[in-house]
Image (cartoon, rainbow, N blue to C red):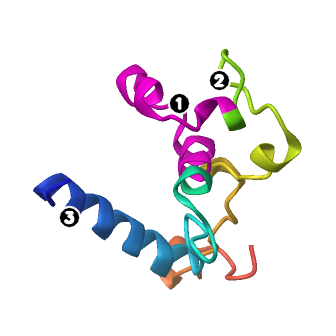
């Protein structure tokens, strides 16, 4: 697959996430393509139908309804589960930095 402007934007967004959240959006240490795809589905939602049908391993990880079919697949975190970033309060906000 050739690299495109879209893939550059995706890489930039993942890099910004890594910096701001101080952790990777996806765990890539000792993972395979199917595990990475499961992480992406957990974080971003279902794949497009065309991609879902082309992904040969989807039946190993998901039911026909798109639900995880085993505990290992359901371990992946969604973006909503990411730690919340607390920014220090500024003098202009009038709030205490501890809140």
| Residue at image coords 72%, 22% | 63
What label sits on residue 46 in the rendered view? 1
Q: Residues within 10 Å of mark 1 (few under 14, many from 20)?
A: some
Residue at mark 3:
8
What label sits on residue 66 in the rendered view? 2
| Residue at image coords 65%, 48% | 78
Q: Main secondary structure of the magenta part?
A: helix
User: Does residue 92 appear in the picture of this structure?
Assistant: no
Q: Is residue 81 magenta?
A: no
Return the residue found at the far right: 71
Depth check: give the residue in front, 24 or 21.
24
Q: Which of disc 1 and disc 3 is earlier in sequence?
A: 3
- Location of residue 70 (image quadrant): top right
Q: Position of residue 50 (x, y in %)?
A: 36, 23
- Location of residue 9 (image quadrant): bottom left
Q: Which residues are magenta?
A: 37-59
Q: Which of disc 3 and disc 2 is earlier in sequence?
A: 3
Q: Position of residue 31 (x, y in %)?
A: 61, 67
Labels 1 and 2 touching (C-beta < 8 A): yes
Return the residue found at the far front: 56
Labels 2 and 3 touching (C-beta < 8 A): no
In whole angstroms, how far apart are the C-alphas of marks 2 and 3? Answer: 28 Å
| Left or right: 61, with 90 as reference point | right
């Amino acid at each position: 697959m050739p690299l495109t402007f879209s893939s550059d934007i995706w890489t930039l967004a993942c890099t910004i996430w890594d910096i701001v959240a101080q952790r990777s959006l996806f765990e890539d240490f000792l993972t395979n393509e199917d595990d990475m795809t499961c992480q992406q589905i957990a974080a971003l939602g279902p794949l497009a139908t065309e991609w879902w049908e082309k992904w040969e391993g989807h039946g190993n990880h998901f039911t026909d309804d798109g639900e995880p079919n085993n505990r290992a697949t359901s371990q992946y975190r969604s973006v909503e589960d990411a730690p919340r970033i607390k920014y220090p309060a500024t003098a202009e906000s009038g709030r205490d930095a501890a809140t």
